[in-house]
Amino acid sequence: MDGARIYAENSIRKRSEQMNYLRLASRLDAVVARLDTQAKMSTISKSMGSIVKSLESSLTTGNLQKMSETMDQFEKQFVNMEVQAEFMESSMAGSTSLSTPEGDVNSLMQQVADDYGLEVSVGLPQAAGHAIAAASKSNEKVDEDDLSRRLAELKARG
C-alpha cells in the first residue's frame, strides 16, 4: 500500500510538472504573440502614415481613382489589424485555462484499483470490493446491482 501511495505521489508530481511546463510554454507563446503583434502594429503605423499622405494628396488634386485605391489599401491594413487582434485575444485566453484538481493521489489510486480489480480501502472515498464481485456477474445486471449497492452505502454513510 505504501509503495502504491509513493508511486501515485510521484505520478501526480510528474503530472504537475508537466502542467507547469505547459503553462510556461503557453505564457511564452503569449509573450511571443504580443511581441509579434507589436512589430506588426509598428509596420501598420508606418503604412497608415503613407496612406494618409497619399489620401491627402489625392484630396488636394481631386483624383477620385487614386483616392479609391488609397481607401482600399486602408481597408486591407485595417482587416489585417483586426485579424492580429483576434489572434492575440484567443492566445491570451488559452494561456490561463489549465488547472489541476484536488485529491489527485486518492483518485488515481482508486482508478488503478478499479481498473485491475484490486481492493484498496485505506483512506479512499469508497471501498473497491464491488470490483471483485462484479467480475463474476453479467454486465447489465452487475451495473444495476452495483449502482444500487453503492447508493445504499452512500445513504448509510450520510
Image: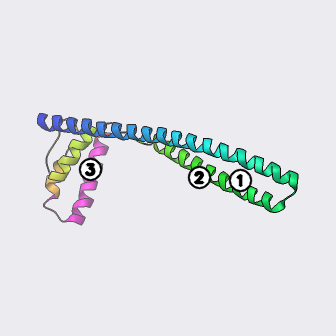
Residue 41: percent from the left, percent from the top?
61, 43
Magenta stretch: includes residue 128: no
Discs 2, 3 touching: Cβ within 8 Å:
no
What residue sits 66% from the left and 43% below the top? 46
Residue 149 falls inside the magenta stretch: yes
Cα separation, mark 2 vs mark 1, equals 14 Å
Looking at the rendered image, the quarter that the C terminus falls into is: top left
Q: Which residue is mark 1?
A: 74
2 or 3: tag closer to the N-terminus: 2
User: What residue is rendered at 80% in x and 62% in y?
Assistant: 65
Q: Can residue 47 be seen from the camera position used here?
A: yes
**Dot 2 corresponds to which residue?**
83
Mark 2 to mark 3 CA distance (whole Å): 53 Å
What is the quadrant of residue 14 in the picture? top left
Q: Which mark is residue 150?
A: 3
Residue type, numbered disc 2: Val
* CB contact under 8 Å: marks 1 and 3: no
**Residue sitting at 79 percent across and 51 percent down?**
55
Tell me residue 72's x, y (percent).
72, 59
Closer mark to the observer between disc 1 and disc 3: 1
- Quadrant housing residue 76: bottom right
